[in-house]
Image (spheres, coloured by chain):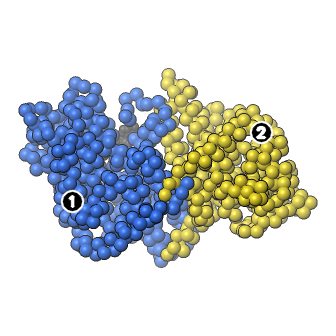
Chain colours: A blue, B yellow
Amino acid sequence: MDLTYTAEEEGFRARLREWLAVSLPKLPVKPGPLDWPGRRAYDTTWQRMLYDAGYGEVHWDAPPTQRLIFLEETELAGAPYVGANFVGLLHAGPTIAAEGAAEQRARWLPPVLRGDEVWCQGFSEPEAGSDLASLRTRAVRDGDSYVVTGSKIWTSHAEVADWCELLVRTDPQASRHRGITWLAMPMDAPGVTVRPLRTLAGAAEFAEMFLDEVRVPVENRVGRENDGWRVTMVTLSFERGTAFVGEVVACRRTLGELAAAARANGTWDDPVLRRSLGRLNAEFRALWRLTQWNVSESQRTGGVPGIGGSVFKLRYSHARQELYDTAAEVLGPDAFDLDREWTADRLSSLSYTIAAGTSQIQRNIVAERILGLPKGRRWTSS
Amino acid sequence: MDFQLTDDQRALRRGVRELLARRFGRDALRAAVDREGTVDRKLWRELGAAGFFSLRLPEAEGGAGLGLPEAVLVFEEAGRALLNGPLVATHLAACGGLPGATDGTRMITCVTQLSSLVPHFADADAAVVIHGGSMRVRYPKELPSARAVRSMDPLTPLHRIQGGAPKAPPRPDAVLLTAAEQLGSAARTTEAAVQYAKEREQFGQPIGGFQAVKHLCAQMLVRTEVARAAVYAAAVTEDFTEIAGAKLLADEAAVQGARDCLQVYGGMGFTWEADVHLHLKRAWLRAQMWLTAAEAEEIQAEALASAL
Ligand SMILES: Cc1cc2nc3c(=O)[nH]c(=O)nc-3n(C[C@H](O)[C@H](O)[C@H](O)COP(=O)(O)OP(=O)(O)OC[C@H]3O[C@@H](n4cnc5c(N)ncnc54)[C@H](O)[C@@H]3O)c2cc1C
């Protein structure tokens, strides 16, 4: 067990720090949380800067430990996270890299890395959430196109995306997991209607997507027809890999700020509150160690994010909610002031136990796939 | 960075697990319960011969020259097996070079780990008094008089010493090795619950097919694995704040794990016959030893404040 970084890893860290120090001041002013086109431009500008400096592919090609260092250092330096590039860099891109044909990789990957194109994820449907395999959006082959009709929901960044990684049903007769196909749909195709949905935090962060006979070229299909479920699973394991590294670092910083605020306003003298903060300190430190453990494991197994991601996500998503609940105790009545830091974060944190697999679904995965308990009658986690 | 067990560490863990399975299997465990927790001195000497107590002493002094991470793996196995006796105290005494402690010919307890309560007071050969970095050895005639307590934990006989012992700042390694025992217990109760859930059938199916049971088991694993990362990392860094945090999380994993295991076992979990209560009572006791949750949380809070 070795927690020290190699000379090579430290070299990578030092060069990155140096680059961040000169590059971050060149970033434009951060747009407001409701300015979506502004946020897209900001996030893609940042991705372009990373690309030009040779860090564009860090999420895909770098050894897991370098990726860990990258995420840690960028967060410590206050750099932006992937933001609008999330799906392109962490879902659709890796899927195309793993499963796409040569022309598809050449067409879609460079623009993601350069920050030229933004992707969104059209998986969930009104009737297909946790039970994603029950999705019903239909795609019917017509010459060299698929004609797609149906609706998607909770599509993050749909309003500012160029492409959508779309799951559609191509064989309604086949068993649930068998008749699904993965398509890259241009968001400006005729028949695509995006209706923003307001989240409980007040912002239109995700949207409903109505698809009315949208024609998607067959050449936009990644993987074989009806093989989309397997293709998609490649994507989901990426999502549960190192996706939360930066956030754990951020939570640890927030905790320090909370302690400072508590000392300043006297709530620190309340032993119950003080001890809650102390407990969270142990919690986030352990989550950081668990991240290092998981990263070391995937480094040994050749970069495949392990099932440990579900264990991590379960604990982390709840810890993060506790963090902001504790923040509210420090703030007292100010916790109701939306202009106070942490108030909006507290609201956002409510999605953590739902998005990317609810806590109940994660527990099913842990129980069935790690502990080997019997599969549920209807629910299948595979 | 390579935060995973090395091959040697895996081999060590396997070796200890095999030794304990052979020498402290179910029958030996229940025999220890029937003896009200007094220690099998023959086994104690065998543990000593196997290097259980001396493993961190330099080779020149008869030890194995191993570090805290290896000690943690060994104590984790002890926790899994519910091995009884003042393991941590004797290990500390051995680290201090006390003759007899190293090879297991003597059994040493500690009078400053559980306020006025002393485990194994009657059958120990001596006791250590720990004060931060310093450690003094006291022989029975030098100790204040003590009165036997009817111990809630059948594997840990307890005495209360007159006047109580002064609360001393704990030794980091004692805290961490106790956390390692808790980790082993948490891992064991998780396994036991999962195994039982696969075998026990109700309503025509294994109870592990019910989500209410499944999710209990999943949470047990989550607590165990988070505690594992914390305990192992603390063994590597030897940082006291990190050690205190590891104890906090391992205590919680062990206590809550045993309770959840009891719940999964149903009526069987409430019996003397099942081992679940042995894990729970021991976990409750260890949670109060060396460093309590309240103290650990204050240490964590202090670390936050001093980083400002
Ligand atoms: C902020 C945010 C962003 C999102 N972004 C996207 C996106 O970009 N693209 C996209 O496709 N989707 C996105 N989603 C959707 C997300 O993946 C789903 O919300 C999630 O999978 C849950 O589905 P659902 O909302 O339909 O809830 P449901 O599946 O209806 O679940 C409702 C409740 O039932 C429980 N439940 C369901 N099935 C089981 C079971 N088998 N066992 C036990 N309990 C069960 C759930 O845990 C939950 O508590 C986003 C969601 C959020 C909150």
- Chain to which the residue tagged by mark 2 belongs: B
Q: Position of residue A310 (x, y in %)?
A: 43, 46
Left or right of B272 on screen, residue A309: left
Name the secondary structure under disc 2. helix
Q: Position of residue B97 (x, y in %)?
A: 79, 60
- Residue at position x 55%, y 54% in the image: A1
Q: Position of residue B86 (x, y in %)?
A: 77, 51
* Disc ID at residue A103: none
User: Which corner quadrant of the figure contains ligand 1?
Assistant: top left
Identify the residue position indicated by label 2 in the image: B33
Q: Residues within 10 Å of mark 1 (few under 14, many from 20)?
A: some
- Chain to which the residue tagged by mark 1 belongs: A
User: Looking at the image, which is closer to me, A45 or A131?
Assistant: A45
Can you tell which of label 2 and label 1 is closer to the viewer? 1
The answer to whether residue B229 is above or below residue B217 is below
- Residue at position x 17%, y 45% in the image: A103
Name the secondary structure under disc 1. helix
* Amino acid type shown at disc 1: Arg
* Disc ID at residue A114: 1
* Amino acid type shown at disc 2: Val
Residue A250 seen from this side: no
Q: CA distance from mark 2 to mark 1?
A: 67 Å
Q: Farthest residue to the top: give it.
A: B204
- Residue B172 found in image quarter: bottom right
Residue A296 seen from this side: yes
